Image (cartoon, rainbow, N blue to C red):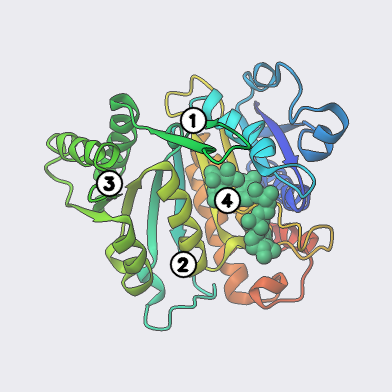
């Protein structure tokens, strides 16, 4: 029988609460399927680990993760450790170290999920955001100069390489072609005359290889406005690291909330393991209270199943989430329910067993 070895980094705050539920769902699916097993190895890395050891992950941590089939991550960051230290030492280190240059973030309003946009039909919010995940505004290149003097300054440089832009843009074209969807590039060439003009040029260049894909190009400010006013115009969206980060929280807000937003950090060549996580953070305001919605973490299990070649199960997990939302019996308070975090995996598995 095939065994998938999954590295689990539950992390901080609500991370462990939601990851526990996702693991139970994957375990349950493996039992239902019968042709594969999931074996989890937990790593205790995160802010508590940092306060004890001075490191977010142990030395050689990446090497330890390398042999796994996938990484399942909860959330990183907690008051008491500066966010740039906690995220830079764990989540971003893994994304960059394993060249997980695609961040796939579905923005899909399921039936039964709350939406603050009263003028929009449920089926009109159904897009997939392909976020560049390895460079751009997050390249971590910069300097702090003349600290403590009146000339003090901070420099933060965006890095847009031809290879980096081409590969994410090509991935998005391939996806749009395969799924027969339109592709929208989101950039900001009117103000960022080097990086984003370069991005726009590459979007056009690569597009010549995909005459069948209908495209459009938007500035990020206008795109944000259309996410709210007319989300139905978006199908596949490709954008830079920072813009993708911001647009997908906006996407979460229109598609049921942070408790329903998942993301896959992919190394498409499979040279390194890919990482699956909810896109929300550690939510210190609700941590430890059983209030966290684990459906985003469960949706990321669906993305993991897709990537491992079990697309049928991936689809069924999203359908089970939708059934749970429609039936409304087992939902956490953010979705208007009274269930606890720990009730949700049983609700999902009960639906999958029907
Ligand atoms: P957050 O996503 O943790 O929380 C934003 C709001 O959404 C909060 O009100 C929270 O209660 C709510 N929320 C988030 N997830 C929820 C869920 N599953 N169910 C119900 N409600 C949920 O963002 P933040 O407050 O800006 O960040 C908190 C910490 O997490 C910071 O340290 C930040 O750097 C970190 N962070 C980590 C990740 C990650 O690990 N991927 C992502 C974002 C933020
Ligand atoms: C996300 C998060 C991270 C990001 C932070 C925590 C570094 O917000 O995954 O969306 O910006 O990529
Ligand atoms: Mn984010």
Instruction: Give x and y (percent) for residue 91.
Output: 62, 36
Q: Identify the residue under disc 2.
A: 109
Left or right, 110 with respect to 71, comes to left
Give the mark, 4 or 2, whose residue is nearer the N terminus: 2
Give the quarter of the image for residue 124: bottom left
**Front position among marks 1 and 3:** 1
In the image, residue 112 sits, relative to residue 244, either above or below, namely: below
Give the mark, 4 or 1, whose residue is nearer the N terminus: 1
Give the mark, 3 or 4, whose residue is nearer the N terminus: 3
Q: Residue furthest front?
A: 150
Give the mark, 1 or 3, whose residue is nearer the N terminus: 1
Q: Nearer the viewer, residue 12 or 333?
A: 12
- Secondary structure at numbered mark 2: loop
Q: Nearer the viewer, residue 343 or 44?
A: 44
- Which residue does the image show at 46% across and 54% down from the upper left? 246
Using the numbered discs, state the Cα–Cα distance from disc 1 to disc 3 in whole angstroms. 35 Å
Using the numbered discs, state the Cα–Cα distance from disc 1 to disc 2 in whole angstroms. 38 Å
Are the residues tagged 4 and 2 within 8 Å (C-beta)? Answer: no
Q: Identify the residue under disc 4.
A: 279
Using the numbered discs, state the Cα–Cα distance from disc 4 to disc 1 in whole angstroms. 26 Å
Q: Nearer the viewer, residue 302 or 286?
A: 286
Q: Identify the residue under disc 1.
A: 142
Q: Identify the residue under disc 3.
A: 176
Are the residues tagged 1 and 3 within 8 Å (C-beta)? Answer: no
Q: How many marks?
A: 4
- Which residue does the image show at 32% across and 30% down from the upper left? 167
Q: Residue furthest bottom?
A: 118
Instruction: Give x and y (percent) for residue 321.
Output: 59, 62
């Amino acid at each position: 029988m095939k065994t998938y070895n999954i590295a689990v980094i539950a992390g901080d705050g609500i991370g462990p609460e939601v990851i526990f539920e996702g693991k139970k769902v994957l375990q349950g699916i493996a039992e239902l399927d019968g042709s594969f097993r999931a074996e989890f190895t937990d790593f205790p890395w995160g802010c508590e680990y940092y306060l004890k050891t001075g490191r977010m992950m142990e030395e050689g941590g990446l090497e330890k993760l390398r042999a796994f089939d996938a990484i399942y991550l909860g959330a990183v960051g907690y008051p008491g450790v500066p966010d740039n230290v906690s995220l830079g030492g764990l989540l971003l280190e893994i994304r960059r170290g394993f060249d997980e240059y695609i961040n796939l973030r579905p923005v899909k309003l399921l039936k039964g999920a709350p939406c603050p946009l009263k003028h929009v039909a449920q089926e009109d919010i159904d897009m997939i955001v392909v976020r560049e995940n390895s460079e751009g505004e997050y390249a971590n290149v910069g300097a702090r100069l003349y600290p403590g003097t009146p000339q003090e300054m901070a420099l933060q440089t965006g890095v847009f390489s031809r290879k980096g832009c081409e590969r994410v843009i090509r991935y998005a074209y391939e996806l749009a072609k395969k799924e027969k969807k339109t592709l929208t590039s989101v950039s900001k060439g009117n103000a960022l005359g080097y990086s984003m003009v370069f991005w726009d040029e590459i979007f056009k260049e690569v597009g010549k290889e995909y005459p069948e894909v209908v495209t459009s190009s938007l500035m990020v400010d206008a795109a944000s406005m259309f996410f709210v006013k007319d989300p139905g115009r978006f199908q596949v969206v490709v954008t830079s690291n920072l813009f993708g980060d911001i647009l997908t929280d906006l996407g979460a807000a229109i598609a049921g909330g942070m408790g329903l937003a998942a993301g896959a950090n992919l190394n498409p060549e499979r040279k390194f393991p890919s990482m699956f996580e909810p896109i929300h953070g550690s939510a210190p305001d609700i941590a430890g209270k059983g209030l966290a919605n684990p459906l985003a973490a469960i949706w990321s299990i669906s993305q993991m199943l897709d990537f491992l070649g079990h697309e049928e199960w991936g689809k069924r997990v999203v359908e089970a989430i939708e059934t749970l939302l429609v039936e409304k019996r087992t939902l956490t308070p953010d979705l208007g329910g009274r269930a606890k975090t720990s009730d949700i995996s049983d609700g999902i598995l009960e639906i999958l067993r029907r």
